Amino acid sequence: MISDLHFSWLEGAILCPLVGAAFVATLRDSHLARKWCLLFSGLTLLCTVGAGLDFQISQAAEADDPWHLVSRIFGRELLLIDQVSAPLLPLVALLYFLTQIATVRTKVERFPFASSLLSEAVLLATYSCKIPWGIVALMALGTILPGLEMRSRRRPSQIYWTYMALFVGLLCAGLYYLERAEPNSTEANWAALVLGVALLIRSGIAPFHSWLPDLFDRATFGTALLFVTPMVGAYGIVRLLVPIAPDWLLHTLAVFAIVSALYGASLALIQREARRFFSYLFLSTAALVVTGLSNMSHHGLTGGLCVWLSLAISLGGLGLTLRALESRRGRLSMEKFQGLYNHTPNLAMCYGLTALAAVGFPGTFGFVGSELLVDATVESHPYVGIIVVLATTINGIAVVQTFFRLFGGAPYLTSVSFQIRTRERYAVLLLAAVVFIGGLLPQPIVASRSRAAEEILRQRLPADQPEQAHDAVAIGK
Amino acid sequence: MFDYQLLIQICGLTVFGAPFLLLCVLGVRTLVGRPLSERTISRSVHVAVVTGLFASLAILGIMLWTGTRHVPVDLVTWVSIPHYHFAVKLMFDRLSVPFVILTFVLCGTISAFASRYLHRERGFNRFHVLYSFFVLGMVTASLAGTIETLFAGWELVGLSSALLVAFHLERAAPVRNGLRVWTVYRISDAALLIAAVVMHHLASEGDFDKLLMNGDWPEGQALLSESQALAVGLLLLIAAAGKSALVPFSGWLPRAMEGPTPSSAVFYGALSVHLGAFLLLRVSPLLDLSFTLQAIIVALGLVTAVYAALVARVQTDIKTALSFASLTQVGIIVAEIGVGFRYVALVHILGHACLRTLQFVRAPSLLLDYYVIENAIGNLPTQPSAAWERMVPRRTTLWLYQLALERGYLDAWLDNGLAAPFLGVIRRCDALERRWVQLFTPRRTENEEVVESALMPVDSL
């Protein structure tokens, strides 16, 4: 049953960045644009937090806005909040807010504030939408902005466009044929497979991942970070694939993801450039999320959903730290020691915290989620599951190696102060608070993810009632 | 009637809470960019360690008074969802209480030493933040009532140790050695995590008091079959070997001496080097199930002891010589555990840790000590060679000398035999990936590449 929120939080959360994007685009002074962007982004964050809290208070399975503005325009209710999306909306808004607030003055001229607000609106709309074709359209729309940015910077973007075109094409084809195929028929299985491949591409799972390091190499760090860390591919898997996919397909997906996790971790270990290191670390850890989501057990799903949240925060923070270092030092090579510790001990600490949270270190946000994930994976795939442990082990080595490469060695000589700025300090403290509070008091988050996992499993009806699950996805219930 | 149980609960919370609070205070102040003064840091550490020590002594007193041998303390149910519980549970018994008292005594001694040794050092605050991490990790691992809790403490000890080895970040060698230590620790962590998960699935339990039923430590009976015990035991042995620098992981121990002397003393000479032996002692009822496992443990312990004794003889700096001397004893302790001498091993750990801490702390004054000895005896101190040394052929002596000098080629074997082939395959994959991406990228003129590389640093946001 769908209940009403007490205020139109969802519509507000999408309208704020949309209006903001339109307004900021008209401003010529980039410092002024930044201030307005922060205001709109802050308002969006408030709306999403309001939506999340309102939903928790209402204790409903699903909720929508009370004024139904969107349904009056489109003729059906497009925006909903449920257990899966409730924490994702504030998470996305927080990531955008932190990225915008941590943009240093010297880089204000280059950061596309209007475009970042627009992509925030698209992403929030994606996470508020449960209608399959709506999700597909919004996911496709979300892929355009980074490509346009690379083109405007005259960077080669062929590989990005190729993979994204493949992703959108397969996604549309899969959903189209799924709607027309008989449930449990061979055609439906093929359609689900096509859908699965599309979502693997968007999730950056090997061997469909080549666009990921390339995007980090060619786009601005901020744009690449905001494009990947919310893990839209994982959202697609939960909404479009898990309710209808046959068991064999989810098993296959899980095996691909597990192998990807190890492959990404191994490649992260040998990278000599910080951006490429980050992209492979993301590949490996995002693969762990997909592993959890493809696991049909309650524990596995709960673990996957927990790791999803923790990774979005921790990798977002890690990416922002690397971006802050780049804004001081230029592209970060790890061929030799950079010696940045004495200049920026706070950024070193922020790197340490977020990197450890990303690999599920005890006491951080990611620990319990990782434990659940490892537990469930070993249970469902006893031997292959051990690869998950190896992947997290190698990731742990890779992040500490990068820490030493960036912050260790003879101090870098410069006459310019590299000290952390006030705004960056706020961002660091906020991230540290989230990482530690989530790590020391994990019960509310884990319990909420456990309820979300139950909800997802409920949608995935038993084999004797596949029609209902098929229809539910097809009509977007 | 007096409620001893409540008193133990309070003391148990204090034992864990004191280092936890210390870490929170030092960590939060560092995070907000307002570190405490040297004096306040030293006092805070002093208060936390003494509080923890007295609380653990109180628990020991109550246990002796009431004749209790095993007291579980449920700290908190961290996570509870359907079919999954993660409880932070402490366990006070004949193994954990002496070990946690040893931890507090040695950490207290070292904190007093460090407050002078590191006076006005740039990294004073950083050292103590990492030190508080270490104390919390040691206390958590020592008192862990579940294997998951032990794993959490184990990881904290590993991270703080590696970062302290790389304490002098401005030099490349400590940083490289810190990474080496961290790599071995991560392998050890992975083995422990796999063992924990396997144990959970085989016995459906993670609590030590349920896993090792029917009796308090060192008695008890594990809930596994012989073959299961062998499999899990081998994983635990890898974990212990990594942490205690047993063969073939011994190479990290001398590298760990790059850290400041106080951390070398308390970590690699005394506490963390014994953590592997502690793990084996904790799961000792499991070892009893498999004779093969026991034989492997004894063999590994003896090989490590012989190896370390040999290598220690050719070292030219005191900290490295002490570290190998320490490893010799750890090898013997592991062999004792394999044979089944649990109490002997525990007493050996306690005595050895205290002696070695003293030796490490005196290490910076070694030259002075030698002057005193020379002045006292009026000559250079000499050490007569043993009779068996004269019986060994010269070629064999030279071969042994070279073997010892190269530290048994263990690092080279690990690097060339395991790491290099793995990295070679991965580098090939990376090269293939780059070639694949190149297929999509149009060729650019040399001018365009020059312009792009010139723009890269400023246009990298």
Image (spheres, coloured by chain):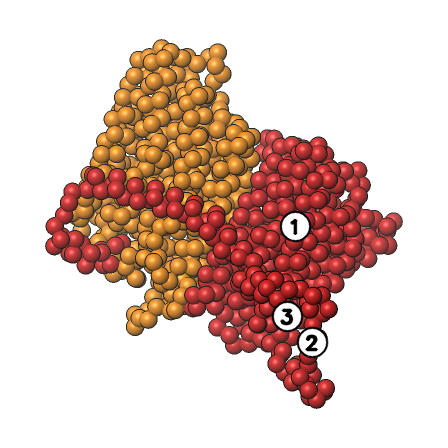
Chain colours: A orange, B red
- Say which of marks 2 and 1 sits in front: 2
Foreground of the two, B12 or A426: B12
Task: Write down the quadrant of residue A426 in the picture.
Answer: bottom left
**CA distance separating discs 3 and 2:** 21 Å
- Say which of marks 3 and 1 sits in front: 1
Foreground of the two, B232 or A287: B232
The residue under label 2 is: B383
Residue B213 visible (yes or no): yes
Residue B254, how many percent across, how many down?
56, 63
The residue under label 3 is: B360
Residue A447, how many percent across, how many down?
54, 36
Label 3 environment density (alpha carbons within 10 Å; few <14, some 14–19, many ≥20) = many
Task: Write down the quadrant of residue A134 in the picture.
Answer: top left
Task: Name which residue type carries label 3.
Answer: Phe
Side of B41 relative to A1 (left or right): right
Q: Secondary structure at mark 1?
A: helix
**CA distance separating discs 2 and 1:** 30 Å
Q: Secondary structure at mark 2?
A: loop
The residue under label 1 is: B300
Task: Name which residue type carries label 2.
Answer: Gln
